[in-house]
Image (tube, helix red, strand yellow):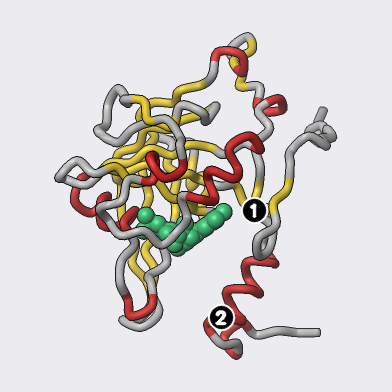
Amino acid sequence: MKIDPGSLSERQRHLFMGNLVVPRPIALVSTISPEGIPNLAPYSLFNIVCYHPVPIVFYTPMRKAGGQKKDSLVNVELTSEFVINLVTEEIAEKMNITSGNYPPEVDEFTVSHLTPVPADLVKASLVKESPFNLECRLYKIVPFGSPDIAGDMIMGEVLRVHVKDELWNDGIIDANHAHLIGRMGWGLYTRTHDLFEIGHPSD
Ligand SMILES: Cc1cc2nc3c(=O)[nH]c(=O)nc-3n(C[C@H](O)[C@H](O)[C@H](O)COP(=O)(O)O)c2cc1C
């Protein structure tokens, strides 16, 4: 079978690509509007762009039908800041609740019963229940698409990372015990407890 994604409908392409590039890490993105309304939403079009000279991460809000921007884009455009909270099995259901199509005036911390904690360097809050919180300053927004179907890749410089003490082991992040989850295809998630090791070829 050979598939050209360009030949698929918008919905088919979403399902196809979402099932293809898996598992994807999940960023639970915390932002705040200039008026002070907090916002929380999950994004699995998310990863690290680079480690050096400064660490940069990205997440991509696709536009809603009619080209309407999601709150996690609008707030960053206005404030140039965000926090990425990594997602564990323990908060998977709550993370999913934050993905509802709520109007901008709804605070998803309240709806999901996740706990906001003040960040050090940005106005958006950390999610207390997340083991790793990345305070980020906007680096660049790369828009793509047409007025009908579009998205915006939001890149941010990681300014400070909060690591739960029990997952900080001799100067190394112990992500193996963090129970992080990844996104598979539509509605499916994967756990991260079945690990194996491969050494560098020159070792
Ligand atoms: C696990 C998960 C991952 C998601 N990833 C994305 C994504 O990468 N891009 C996107 O546009 N929407 C994604 N969504 C849907 C958004 O979370 C949803 O549209 C949400 O309402 C956006 O909220 P906001 O307007 O507050 O930013 C995802 C949903 C879930 C449950």
The vertical placement of 31 against 62, above or below, is above
Q: Which residue is mark 2?
A: 11
Residue in front for this viewpoint, 57 or 61: 61
The residue that disc 1 covers is: 183
Disc 1 and disc 2: Cα gap in Å?
Answer: 18 Å
Mark 2 surroundings within 10 Å by alpha-carbon count, few (fewer than 14), some (14 through 19), many (20 or more) = few
Q: Quadrant of residue 195?
A: top right
- x%, y% of residue 7? 60, 90
Q: Residue at x 46, y 26 (%)?
A: 128
Give the vertical position of 189 relative to 30 (above or below). below
175 to 25, vertically: above or below: above
Q: Give the amino acid at mark 1.
A: Arg
> Residue 45: which disc?
none
Residue 34: name its quadrant.
Answer: top left
Disc 2 marks a residue whose amino acid type is Arg
Determine whether, in the image, residue 142 is placed left or right of residue 7: left
Residue 171 at what x, y percent from top left? 58, 13
Q: Nearer the viewer, residue 108 or 59?
A: 108
